[in-house]
């Protein structure tokens, strides 16, 4: 057993009790989208961080507690915004579908 979440990213080595984790996957038509970018924006819309998606469409941020916006930029798709709540001690799991 590897400790990975069902179909998601492994949390091995992550102390979830001390972190607010926002992670998920970018998909198009149910298929993973690699080479997309997911931006983390604060409550005022200010850019905080950006990560590329993996070949399986996965991404992860360690954020502060509160409300965040995930802005997904994928090839041949309009930007998609999703609001998420981050809270220390939990994992906010998000699936983002792009056109």
Image: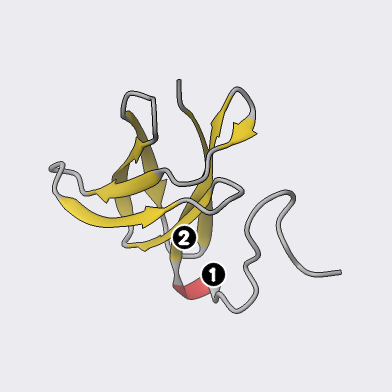
| Residue 93 seen in the figure | no
Quarter residue 44 falls in: top left
| Residue 98 seen in the figure | yes
Q: Which residue is mark 2?
A: 21
Viewer-side residue, 63 vs 51: 51
Q: Earlier in the sequence, mark 2 or mark 1?
A: 1
Q: Identify the residue at image location x=54%, y=69%.
A: 16
Rendered view: 78 above or below 26: above
The percent position of residue 22, horizontal first and vertical second, equals 45, 54
The percent position of residue 82, horizontal first and vertical second, equals 37, 33
On screen, residue 58 versus residue 88, left or right, reads: right
Q: Identify the residue at image location x=72%, y=62%.
A: 4
On screen, residue 91 versus residue 67, left or right, reads: right
Number of other residues with Cα within 10 Å of mark 2, as a class: few under 14, some 14 to 19, many 20 or more = many
Find out whether the residues at labels 2 and 1 contact each other: C-beta distance under 8 Å.
Answer: yes
Q: Identify the residue at image location x=58%, y=51%.
A: 55
Q: Which residue is mark 1?
A: 16
The percent position of residue 64, horizontal first and vertical second, equals 31, 62
Quarter residue 19 falls in: bottom left
Q: Secondary structure at mark 2?
A: strand
Q: Secondary structure at mark 1?
A: helix
Question: Distance between the Cα atoms at labels 2 and 1?
Answer: 7 Å
Rendered view: 2 above or below 46: below
Number of other residues with Cα within 10 Å of mark 1, as a class: few under 14, some 14 to 19, many 20 or more = some
The percent position of residue 75, horizontal first and vertical second, equals 39, 33
């Amino acid at each position: 057993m590897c400790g990975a979440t069902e179909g998601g990213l492994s949390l091995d080595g992550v102390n979830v009790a001390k972190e607010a984790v926002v992670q998920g996957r970018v998909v198009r038509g149910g298929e993973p989208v690699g080479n997309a970018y997911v931006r983390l924006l604060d409550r005022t819309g200010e850019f905080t961080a950006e990560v590329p998606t993996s070949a399986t469409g996965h991404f992860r941020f360690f954020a502060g507690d509160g409300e965040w916006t995930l802005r997904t930029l994928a090839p041949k798709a309009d930007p998609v915004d999703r609001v998420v709540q981050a809270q220390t001690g939990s994992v906010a799991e998000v699936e983002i579908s792009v056109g």
